Image: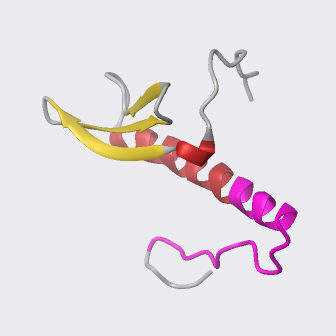
Amino acid sequence: MTAAPEPMTDLDLRGLRASIESEDGDLMVVVHDGETCIRLESGMGGTREQAILGAERLIEVLDQYVGLLKVRAGSWTPFRVAADRTGELA
């Protein structure tokens, strides 16, 4: 796994907003906290499958992060039940 570069900015989760947008037929996710904005896009090269895998990696980490935040907030049921791509419970 390649080491991540140093973060250039921070986003405040308390004010976080996200939306799906389209530009010239390309889908992207725009995330902002009212001050800082980032755009997640599938990129010029590569395949849709590679973009899907990247989005799934992000979802997996965010799901774990939410679970950890819930544990710290005192939740006894912090994690969602996972479903596979067919919608069946894993």
* Number of numbered callouts drawn: 0
Position above or below: 90 against 11: below
Residue 28 drawn at (x, y percent): 32, 37
Which image quadrant is residue 39 in?
A: top left
Q: Residue furthest bottom?
A: 88
Residue 53 located within the stretch drawn in magenta: no
Q: Nearer the viewer, residue 14 or 88?
A: 14
Residue 57 drawn at (x, y percent): 59, 47
Residue 78 located within the stretch drawn in magenta: yes
Q: What's the residue at 45%, 39% (across, down)?
A: 50
Q: Nearer the viewer, residue 79 or 83?
A: 79
Residue 85 drawn at (x, y percent): 46, 71
Position above or below: 56 against 36: below
Quadrant location, the C terminus: bottom right
Q: Is residue 24 left or right of residue 64?
A: left
Q: What's the residue at 52%, 41% (across, down)?
A: 54
Which image quadrant is residue 83 in?
A: bottom right
Quadrant location, the N terminus: top right
Q: Nearer the viewer, residue 84 or 17?
A: 17
Position above or below: 47 against 44: below
Position above or below: 52 against 36: below
- Magenta residues? 64-85
Q: What's the residue at 83%, 80% (across, down)?
A: 76
Q: What's the residue at 44%, 45% (across, down)?
A: 17
